[in-house]
Amino acid sequence: MTGPGGAAPLVGVSSYLVQARWGPWDQRAALVPDTYVRWLRRAGNQVALLPPADPAAAGAALARVDALVVPGGPDVGPVHYGAAPDPHTRADGPERDHWELALVRAALAAGKPVLGICRGAQLLNVALGGGLEQHLPDRLGHTEHSGTPGRFGRHEVRTRPGTLLGRLLPGSVDVATYHHQAVGRLGRGLEAAAHSADDVIEAVELPGARFVLGVQWHPEADEDLRLARALAEAARGLAATG
């Protein structure tokens, strides 16, 4: 955690379990893409990975870090927002769903800064009782938000003046995007903080909180460190008053 003299805050990043290969080994591993780690470190954060565990341990895990980041990944299971699965939904990480929902709720209860990225933004919305739009192309008639396998797409988002995100990223921002789902029904207390030109909710935030923000795009894929620096500042502020 943040130490004397404003040392770098410790940001917990939820990781996930996948079958991975390295050297002679082919085993299940807990990982997160290094782009997230490098992006956070460049903004002055330390990073600790939080692999899936018993959801009952989420509070203890969050007590050891100054902030939480929930990264991108597969679709959130529709069971968590009371919907039947769409044929296009690929919710293949129930263990991760339970763990990350517990982490987000523990972070909110403790007043810790939270940044959700892509799936993380959707999961933040679900954790607060919101729902998701399961397949955007059905409504939009295009796949411009989805990118192509292994490559991000790009489009502009416009942030809302007067919001936390609007202060951090005023006006229009060109973003890296890779998603076919999006926030639908807003969760308790959340407000939309950015939209795309085709009226997809691109960010949500919790007014009145120190820093609770979810962005549908991938800021870690770009050189822009404004969100990572704002997270570090919020985490330092919490540690200074804790």
Image (tube, grey):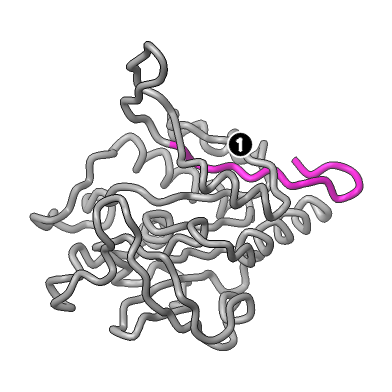
Highlighted range, magenta: 1-15
Coordinates of residue 158 in the picture (x, y in percent): 46, 84
Please, is residue 38 above or below residue 26 in the view?
below
206 or 182, nearer to the observer: 182
Coordinates of residue 15 in the picture (x, y in percent): 46, 37
Q: Position of 120 compared to 133: left or right? A: right
Please, is residue 34 above or below residue 225 in the view?
above
Residue beneath the point at 57% across and 75% down? 165
Q: Is residue 219 magenta?
A: no
Q: Quadrant of residue 48?
A: top right
Name the kind of residue labelled 1 in the image.
Ala
Pointer 1 local density, CA inside 10 Å: few below 14, some 14–19, many at least 20: some
Q: Position of 136 compared to 187: left or right? A: left
Q: Residue furthest left?
A: 87
159 or 86, nearer to the observer: 159
Q: Is the magenta region chiefly helix, strand or loop?
A: loop
Residue beneath the point at 37% across and 60% down? 122
- Secondary structure at badge 1 equals strand
Q: Is residue 3 magenta?
A: yes
Residue beneath the point at 58% across and 83% down? 170
104 or 116, nearer to the observer: 116
Q: Position of 241 compared to 19: left or right? A: right
Q: How many marks can you see?
A: 1
Please, is residue 77 above or below residue 179 in the view?
above
Q: Which residue is mark 1?
A: 48
Q: Position of 134 compared to 86: left or right? A: right
33 or 240, nearer to the observer: 33
Residue beneath the point at 55% across and 35% down? 49
Coordinates of residue 93 in the picture (x, y in percent): 28, 39
Quadrant including the N terminus: top right
Please, is residue 55 above or below residue 138 in the view?
above
